[in-house]
Image (tube, rainbow, N blue to C red):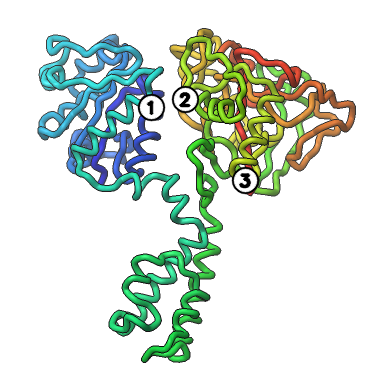
Amino acid sequence: MSKIFISYRRDDSSGYAGRLFDKLEHHFGKDQLFMDIDLLEAGEDFAEVIQQKLQSVQVAMVLIGKHWLVIRDSSGRKRLDNPDDWVRLEIATLLERKIRVIPVLVGGAQMPLSSQLPKPLESLARRHAHEISDIRFHSDVDKLIQILEKTIGNQDFHKLSNPAHQQKEFSLNKLTGVLVISMLILLAGGLLYHYSDSVLSRNSIENETSLTTDQLKQKSEKPASITYEALEPLFDNIQKTSDQLAQAIKALPPNTSDESQFSFEPQMVRIPPGSFIMGSPESETGRKSDESPQRKVTIAYPFEIGRYEVTFAQYDAFSKDTNRKLPSDQGWGRDDRPVISVSWDDAQAYVQWLVKKTGKKYRLPTEAEWEYVARAGTSTAYWWGDVIGQNNAVCNGCGSQWDNKQTAPVGSFKPNAFGVYDTAGNVWEWTQDCWHGDYTNAPLDGTAWLERNGGDCSHRVVRGGSWVSGPRGLRSADRYGDGSGVSNLNTGFRVARDF
C-alpha cells in the first residue's frame, strides 16, 4: 500500500504536483505514493473512499499555491467552506489520523492562518511548512525527500526504486540471468543448497546475479557429487523459460528502457511504431498552408525521445566539458528550465557530445517523429483537444503563471499519452529537417527531409511553439523554419535516440 500522499487542487497547483510526483516516484518508486482519489464507481460514498484510500498513508503533503485558500466553486462559495469538498475531506482525514502532514508552499504562496481555515483544518496552520521554489526546485525537493525518508523509515528506496539504478542493474541480460537463477533455486530446492562446491553455492546465488546459463554450465563441470548430466533436463527447461522471458522483456511497454543512464543524460521515453496523419485539415483554426497537404506517415520502427526538453543543467554539463560559453538564462534560472539561446548547430554539437560520451545513438528527432510524438495518437489541434484551455502549457494566452514572461521549468504541465512533456509551448524545438515550404513530395516513412525537392538546409524546422507564441503556434501541426546558426530566447530542443 502507498505510504506517501500528495494533496493538491488542480486549479491551484497541478503543475507543481505533477513535477513533485515525478521526482518522488524516481526516488521512492510508484508503489510508495499516490495523489489522486477521484475515480469513483456509481453509488460509492466519496467520504468512505477517502477514508479507505488514506488508511495506509504514513505521511502526506498538502500543496498550497497562491490561490489555494480562495478558489471558489460555480456558486461563488469558497471550496474549502464546503464540507463535501474533496481537498477539505482529504486533509481533515489525514489530520484526524495524527500522521505527519506537511504543508508545501509553491509558487510563492504564504501559509494561511488558522482563522482563515475551516475548523476541521485549523490545526494545519500549526504544521511547519516546507517551501518549494521554481529556482531551487530540485534542492527543495531533495530536502523534502530527506524528511519523508525519516518519517517512513530508512529503506534503501534509491536502490530499489530509482529508475536509473534499476536500468543499470537490470538490463535485459542481467534480468534474464536473475530469473534463471531464481527458477533454478525453486526447482532444485534443497538439493543444490547443501552442495557448496557443486552447481551453485550460496555465494553464487547472492553475488553472481548476472550469471548466464552458459556460465552456470561451466560451474557445473567442476568435480562435485552432482553432475551436470544429472541436471541437464533442468537446464534445458530453464533455458526455454529464460528465452520466453527475454522475449517478454523485449516487448515491455513503450515508455520503458533497459539502457543504463549516465547522470548527465536526458531521461528518455520509448515510442512504439505507428502511423498518423501529418499536417492539419483545412477546417483547423489557425492552420497555415505550409502544413499541407495532409498525408499518412508510417513510422515502422521504435525509437526514443526525450521526456523533457534539454535543460540548462544538462546543456551546461556539455558546455563545461567542451569549454563552451554558457548560454544566458536571462535571470530566469538554470537547473531544470529548458536551455535557450542555442542554435541548431549548438544542438547538433550537444548530440554529438552525448554520442561520444555514452556510445549511444543520440540525434535530433525528425520533423515527422516530432509530430508523431506530439500528437500521441490524437488528431486534434492540441494533444488535449481543439481549444487551448487554461494552464495546459505556457504561451502568450495559455493561462499559466509564466505566460509571455519567461520559460517554465520542464514538466510543469501534464504530459501527453506517451508520457512526454512540453511538446506544446515553453520553447520551440529544433528538428533534423531542412526547411520546405509545404509537404509536397515529403517522405512518408518518418525519415528526415533534407535537400530533396528544393529544401533549404541553411534553415531548419522548429516545432512546438514557445512562451511568447500565441495559441496557434502550439498546435501539433504548426511549423516554422529558422537559420541553423540563429539562437534566441524562445528556442531550445529535445533529443531522440535509436536503440
In contact (CB < 8 Å): disc 3 and disc 2? no
Q: Residue at x 64, y 24 (%)?
A: 429
- Disc 1 marks which residue? 138
**Corner quadrant of residue 107:** top left
Q: Is residue 417 visible?
A: no
Please tell me whether residue 147 is drawn above or below residue 205 in the rendered image: above
Residue 18 position within the rendered picture, expressed as x and y whole percent measured from the top left: 39, 29
**Corner quadrant of residue 379:** top right
Residue 220 position within the rendered picture, expressed as x and y whole percent measured from the top left: 44, 83
The residue type indicated by label 1 comes to: His
Please tell me whether residue 47 is drawn above or below residue 457 in the rendered image: below
Work out whether residue 217 or residue 439 is closer to the camera in this orientation and state it.
217
| N-term-proximal mark, 3 vs 2 | 2
- Disc 3 marks which residue? 360
Work out whether residue 295 or residue 348 is closer to the camera in this orientation and state it.
348
Q: Residue at x 47, y 25 (%)?
A: 336
Q: Is residue 280 visible?
A: yes
Q: CA distance from mark 3 to mark 2?
A: 23 Å
The residue type indicated by label 2 comes to: Asp
Work out whether residue 147 or residue 183 is closer to the camera in this orientation and state it.
147
- Disc 2 marks which residue? 336
Classify mark 3: helix, strand or loop: loop
Q: Residue at x 70, y 22 (%)?
A: 479
The residue type indicated by label 3 comes to: Lys
